[in-house]
Image: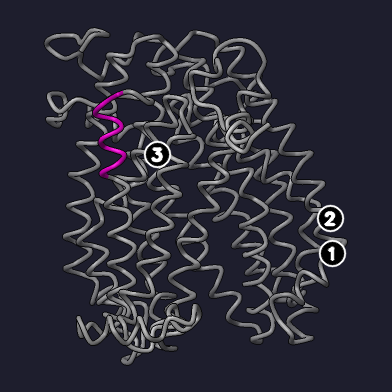
Amino acid sequence: MGLRESVDSLFRGPEGMDLTSGGIGWPLFYLSLPIIVQNLFQVLYNLADTFWLGRHSTEALSAITFAFPIVFLMISLALGVSVAGSVLVAQHVGAGNEGRAAYAASQTMAYAAVISIVLGVLGYAFVDDVTALMGVNASVEPLVVEYMRVYAIGLFAVFGFAVFMALMRGYGDTVTPMYVMAGSVVLNIVFDPILIFGFEANPLFGAFGLDGLEAAALAATGFTGWGIGGAAIATVGSRALALVVGLVIMFRGNHGVQIRLSEMLPDRSFGRTIVEIGLPASVEGAARSLSITLLLVVVATFPNAVSGAYGIGTRVFSVIFLPALAVSQGIETMTGQNIGADAVERAAETNHFGARAMLVLLTVGGGLIMLAAGPIASIFSPDPAVVDHSTTFLRVTGLTFGFIGVMRAYTGGFRGAGHTMVAAVISLVTLGFVRLPVAWIASGPLGVMGLWIAFPISNIVGGVVAYCWFKRGTWRDGTLTQSGPTPDVPAPDAQPTDDD
């Protein structure tokens, strides 16, 4: 079997699988695997900025550290649009109504443009005030502002590409976005050092022994780089090119869902549907960002070795939980399509299957992390105190990783059924009402151990709450398709045909 055949056997498009009949495990696997790869590419995106800016200056590296929470908050506020679009497309595709799916996708992209432009203008205007509230020091603040203003200008490129991936996922195609994302990451990795350093003392040229080429390019262009602004331009520019490719794919309609320019005039009734489905997802993302920030306040009360261990632990978690995030989004799509196809029992079994799989997989993964906690921690830090705290953190939390998988599985199902508020409440309960208070209160009498035990406690509570809430079956009632094919989304004046 050749390389191309091996890749095709792992990554199948929607034409190669049926999400509404037959087995559940393999379709969910084929949906989720490309999403895992996409998430890994996103990690590479962030690492590229961090890697090159760290070689530019300490101030630039510090600035990107402060800029990431602002970026995450802006994207979280707009996240609901992509979730709503994915859910609506999935339900209409499951119902066999390609025309409605195309209309929903077209409207979602239109609202994404409007919302991202508004957020971009606000971000550009108020980034100074936000950095002041964060207490950024005087040497770093101008760099944060420079990065964020470029990012704000190009916010539609970043967010529009995320919406493209969500709409394609709702259709059942996670492979095409994966390839587009791969191209975008390669462009960002290439552009980053050139736009940051220019052609003067560029570490990329030196690494490949191209000093002569570097000198010639500098002499010809005089370009000495834009520093942190160059990193922002590389990120926004590569995403803009990826968005152009995504729009071409969707306008053609040859792969995945199709969008039509004639259906992209924002409709107010559809806007209300976007708000009803998407707003809780946006609140969930923003609240998740806020709770993580507040937890850092607790961490900051301990010595630097503890905060270093916390950073190591959370980085390990972010890698371990990639399958859970991917399966959650795969379940979201399968739930939406099965509800659209009126296969509610199959939708329920999809959620239970995903939860069982994640419980086993992540529990085993957590057990391995526990056994290798010391060596893993030593990879990130040579400091014995940091390694000791990191080892304890990983061992205390490892066996509860499976409960995170259970929670992610069922919250994906709630979103696929249109019950995004339930998914938001479960996340808020887990992070805001369990993890943060436990860490705050228990760290007093128990010290560092009180901080660490907040994680396994909240993991278990989140998994149990999600399972019990799903078992109640309330997600079956009031779903978008059970009262007719999305009544809040009006059909176009002339229904498109398959030949359009």
The answer to whether the residues at label 2 and label 1 have Cβ atoms under 8 Å apart is yes
281 horizontally vs 404: left or right: left
Q: In the depicted view, which residue is nearer to us: 42 or 363?
A: 42
Residue at 12% from the left image edge and 30% from the top image edge: 265
In the rendered image, the quadrant that contains the C terminus is: top left
Secondary structure state at the residue bearing disc 3: helix
Quarter of the rendering occupied by the N terminus: top right
Name the residue at 31% across, 68% down. Answer: 232
Q: Position of residue 490 (x, y in %)?
A: 20, 16
Q: Please state which amino acid type lies under the numbered disc 3.
A: Met
- Residue type, label 2: Leu
Q: Residue at label 2?
A: 368
Left or right for 474, reference 457 = left
Side (left or right) of 397 relative to 16: right
The secondary structure making up most of the magenta span is helix
Task: Decide: is 10 above or below 61.
Answer: above
Q: Say what secondary structure mark 1 lies in.
A: loop
According to the image, label 3 marks what residue? 165
**Could you tell me how far apart the alpha carbons at marks 3 and 2 are, in whole angstroms?**
32 Å
Q: Mark 1 points at which residue?
A: 372
Q: From which residue to which does the magenta span run?
A: 244-253
**Colour pattern of the rendering:** one colour
Q: In this view, does 416 lie above or below 292?
A: above
